[in-house]
Amino acid sequence: MKSVLYLGCPGPERADTERLLGAANVSVIWADSVSNALSELQRRDVPVLLDLSRGAAALQNAREIRHHRAATLMFAVVDARRPDLTTEAVLEGMADVFARPLGGRRVANAIDRELKYESHDANAPATDGDLYSHSASMREVMALVARASTMRAGVLIRGEEGTGRQVTARAIHSQQADGRGAFVVINCAAHDADGLDLHLFGQNTRRQNGDHEWKGLERVSRQGRLYETLNGTLYLQNIAEASSRVQARLARLLRDREVVLSETGQTIDFDLRPIAGVNPGFDEAVREGRVRDDLCRRLSVLRIDMPPLRNRREDIPALANYFMREICASLRIPPKTLSRSALSLIAALPWRGNAAELRTLLESVVCGLQGGRGIGLEDVLTHVRLDGGPAVFANGGTLKQARARFERDYIAAVLEQHRGRISEAAKALGIQRTNLYRKMRLLRVVRSK
C-alpha cells in the first residue's frame, strides 16, 4: 500500500478522504502543521498532499517544506472555485494539482506516474491520461463519467479533436467497480468494409445460407478483436466510416448480448461496455443515414459532451504542468517549470486544437530550450502567435511597434481569460491595477464583458 502525508486537510473531511484514498490502496498520514509534517518526513520519505484551503498561508507551508526537503514529491488539493490557487500551486512546483472532491484513484495514478518518472524506467507500465476537472464544465463531465462507470450501456462521447474523448472513455473503464476486461480501441476508418468485419468478428464468421444453428445471433471468433473485449470496454472511433453491414452486426450484438462462438458453435453471453468517440457532426451523420439508427440508440444511452479547451481555461495550468512533466520525463531531463507570464500566455491562447495542440506546443518549447529549469514568456513566444499563426511577430515593423502590438493582444487575451475582471488580470500580468488601466487606455484595449 502506498502512503501519503496530508497536511492541512479540514477535520470534517478526513473520514471521507481516508475512505476514498484507502479504496485506491493509499494510506494517509495526517499532519496539522509544517513542523509536524517535517518530523514525519524525517521518519519516512513519502509524498505530501498539501491542502490549499487557507490560500496564501498554505502556499507558505509549501515553501517551508521545500526549503527543508527540496526533493520531496508534493501535490496540491484545491477548491475548484479558486482557479487562481491552481496557478499558484503550479508556480510553486507542485507535481500535480487535484480538485475537490478528491479522487483516490487519481492520487494513486499521479504517485505512480511521478515515481516512474524519477526512476527513468522505460519499461514501467504507462498510466492513462488524467482528466483535469477544475472547471465547472469538466466537473459535469466527471459526474457523468462516475455514472457511466456503474452501467454497461452505451456511452457516446462527443467533442472536437483533442478534447480528451479517449481519455474520458478510459476513465469510465478504469472506474468500474469490478475492474473486469480489457479496454479495446477500434478505429473504423483504418480498414475497408471486409477488413473491418474480419478485424472485429474474426475469420469465417459471416452468416451462411441454411445455417439453422445460427439462431439469429452473430458469430464471433476468438481471433477477432470483439472477443478480446468480452467483459471489457469497446471504444469505437469514426463509427460513421464503418460499412452498413458492420454497423448492422454491431447493433445486433449489442441488442442480443449473446453470440455464437465460431470455433465451437456454443452460445455464450457477450457482455461489454460500448463507447463511441465522435465529432460534433455526428448527429448530422445519423440524419444522413451514415450511422444506423438502431446502432446509434445503443451507443448513446448516455451522452457526454466534451468542452473545448478554450471554454475550460481554469484547467489549463494544471494540464500544462502535467504535459510538461510527462514530456520532460520522456526526454529524461529534469522537469521544467513555467514562469507566471508564460503560464498566463498559455492560458489565454485560443487552443483551436485543444489539449493535443497544447501538448505539441509544450514539446516544441521544451525541445527548443538551451538549458535551465525555467520557461519564460519569450520561450513560448518563439512558437506561437496570439491569432493562432506560427510565429508572434510575423507582420514586421519596428521593435517598438512589434512590442506595442504584442502588449495590446496579450493584455486583451488575459482580460478575456479573466472575464474582464481587472484585479485578477492585473495579478496575472504582474502589474498594478492602475498600471493596467493606463496601458489599456494607451493601447486602446477594450475590456470584455
Image (tube, rainbow, N blue to C red):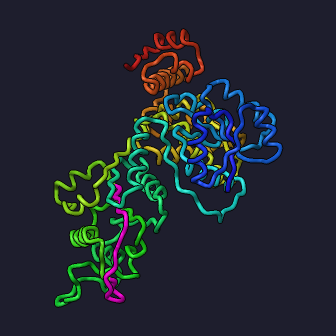
Is any atom of residue 33 visible in this view? yes
Foreground pick, 135 / 444: 135
The range drawn in magenta is 261-277
Residue 215 falls in which quadrant of the image?
A: bottom left
Residue 336 image point, x, y percent: 66, 42
Quadrant of the image containing the C terminus: top left
User: Does residue 41 appear to the left or right of 109 in the view shown?
Assistant: right
Residue 14 image point, x, y percent: 61, 39
User: Does residue 303 appear to the left or right of 441 in the view shown?
Assistant: left
Q: Which residue is drawn at 26% across and 61% down?
A: 298
Quadrant of the image containing the N terminus: bottom right
Residue 12 image point, x, y percent: 58, 34
Q: Which residue is drawn at 60% across and 51% down?
A: 22
Foreground pick, 425 / 294: 294
Residue 44 image point, x, y percent: 79, 48
Q: Does the magenta stretch include residue 306?
A: no
Q: Is residue 188 above or below residue 331?
A: below
Q: Residue at x 43, y 55 (%)?
A: 172
Q: Is residue 246 above or below residue 435?
A: below
Q: Is residue 273 magenta?
A: yes
Is any atom of residue 363 visible in this view? no
Q: Is residue 419 above or below residue 148?
A: above
Q: Is residue 414 above or below residue 288?
A: above
Q: Which residue is drawn at 43% across and 40% down?
A: 139
Residue 204 falls in which quadrant of the image?
A: bottom left
Residue 39 falls in which quadrant of the image?
A: top right
